Amino acid sequence: MRSSSTPYEETADFAIPGNFTVDELPPPVETKTAFGSYTATCAYDPATRTIRCKRALVMQAAEIPAKDYMSVRQFYETIQKAEQAPVVLSRVK
């Protein structure tokens, strides 16, 4: 396995309209393997009515044996599930 890596980081802020409130945020996700790591978090700041979501992916250059296929698949499934997790808002009456 080589030691070079490819990092990717992203932060996104979402303003919540005044007639909505945050009901649910996705749970934090962190996964690490020999070939990469991924983290994702979302937090709500009621003072600014803003949701901040952060995610980071670091991939290590690697040759992965076929016997490790399921761990690679699970890594990418974890990422896909995290990135498709919804933020649930409720309309304030």
Image (cartoon, rainbow, N blue to C red):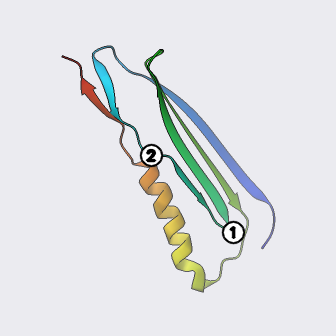
Q: Residue furthest right?
A: 3
Q: Is residue 1 left or right of residue 80?
A: right
| Circle 2 Cα neighbour tier, 10 Å, few/some/many (<14 / 14–19 / ≥20) | few
Mark drawn on residue 5: none
Of the two numbered discs 2 and 1 on the same chain, state the one appearing first in sequence: 2
| Mark 2 and mark 1 residues within 8 Å of each other at the beta carbon | no
Secondary element at tag 1:
loop
Q: Is residue 10 left or right of residue 91?
A: right
The type of residue carrying mark 2 is Pro
Identify the secondary structure beneath mark 2.
loop
Q: Position of residue 85 (x, y in %)?
A: 39, 47
Q: Quadrant of residue 72?
A: bottom right
Q: Residue at x 53, y 31 (%)?
A: 12
- Give the residue at the far bottom of this rendering: 67
Q: Residue furthest left?
A: 93
- The residue under the point 59% across, 84% down is 66
Could you say where residue 23 lies in the image, as x and y percent from the top left? 31, 32
Q: Residue 2 vs residue 90: left or right?
A: right
From the viewer's perspective, is the residue at label 2 or at label 1 nearer?
2
- Which residue is the site of mark 1? 34
| Most foreground residue, 51 or 61 | 51
Residue at (30% x, 30% y) in the render: 89
- Quadrant containing the C terminus is top left
Is residue 36 positioned above or below 53 on the image? below
Q: Which residue is mark 2?
A: 27
Foreground pick, 26 / 71: 26
Quarter of the image with the N terminus in it: bottom right
